[in-house]
Amino acid sequence: MLDKFKPTWMVNTIYAVSPDQLKERGIRAVFSDLDNTLIAWNNPDGTPELRQWMSSLKEAGIPLIVISNNSKARVAKATKNLDLPFVSRSLKPLSFGIERARKKLGLKKSEVVMVGDQLMTDMIAANEAGVRSILVKPLLDTDKWDTRINRFFERIVWHKLRNEYPDLQWQEDLND
């Protein structure tokens, strides 16, 4: 049962994962949660580190697509300055959003990775979709009100995950 929460990798920040590391693992597209993963939930402009990482993905021919539970209007507003495609109302922890984006790109499950900061939505959705996943630490220590509820349950799951999988460790990048 805990397998549905288990990430493939745990990385401090997605910005440290290079296109070469992704390509070495056969990954041809990155799907990512939005709030507290790519951007701080209260700062839609992103950071210079995000823009540099996005540029390196683009140069490598690796598309980045936002998979978010937020409304189309909210995601469009947040991604406008980043010029990113997105799937809104993705219904995570269900796999619909991931499947829709994967099929649109015509990629196999083994060719995509889902990035997110939450076990309860992002990691479950990735595992339900049968794709690999990267859990990242949230960019901010604060969350929107609805995410705080998930974080409460996430602490309980974390404790059980760590007992079941003591090898789960935070890494600097995928080669760490």
Image (cartoon, rainbow, N blue to C red):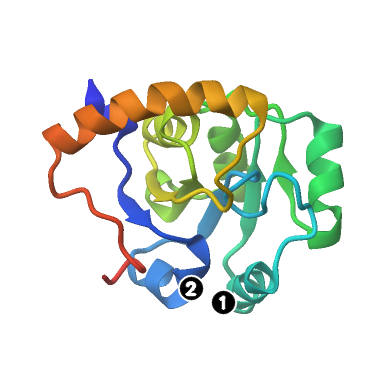
The amino acid type found where label 2 is placed reads Pro
The amino acid type found where label 1 is placed reads Ala
The image shows residue 47 at horizontal and vertical percentages of: 70, 67
Query: Badge 1: few (under 14), some or many (20 or more) residues near its Cα, within 10 Å?
Result: some
Above or below: residue 11 compared with residue 4:
below
Q: Which residue carries the number 1 mark?
A: 60
**Looking at the image, is mark 2 or mark 1 earlier in the sequence?**
2
Above or below: residue 2 compared with residue 20:
above
Q: Residue at x 86, y 45 (%)?
A: 77
Q: Residue at x 32, y 53 (%)?
A: 9
| Count of marks placed on residues | 2
Quadrant containing the C terminus is bottom left
Q: Which residue carries the number 2 mark?
A: 19
Above or below: residue 34 compared with residue 144:
below
The image shows residue 98 at horizontal and vertical percentages of: 55, 37
Q: Quadrant of residue 34?
A: top right
Quadrant containing the N terminus is top left
- Relative placement, left or right, of 40 versus 72 is left
C-alpha separation, residue under disc 2 versus residue under disc 1: 6 Å
- Relative placement, left or right, of 4 versus 42 is left
Task: Give the numbered dot on residue 172.
Answer: none
Tell us which disc is closer to us: 2 or 1.
2
Circle 1 SS class = loop
Badge 2 vs badge 1, beta-carbon distance below 8 Å: yes
Q: Is residue 93 visible?
A: no
Q: Is residue 13 visible?
A: yes
Q: Residue at x 22, y 33 (%)?
A: 161
Query: Badge 2: few (under 14), some or many (20 or more) residues near its Cα, within 10 Å?
Result: many
The image shows residue 147 at horizontal and vertical percentages of: 58, 28
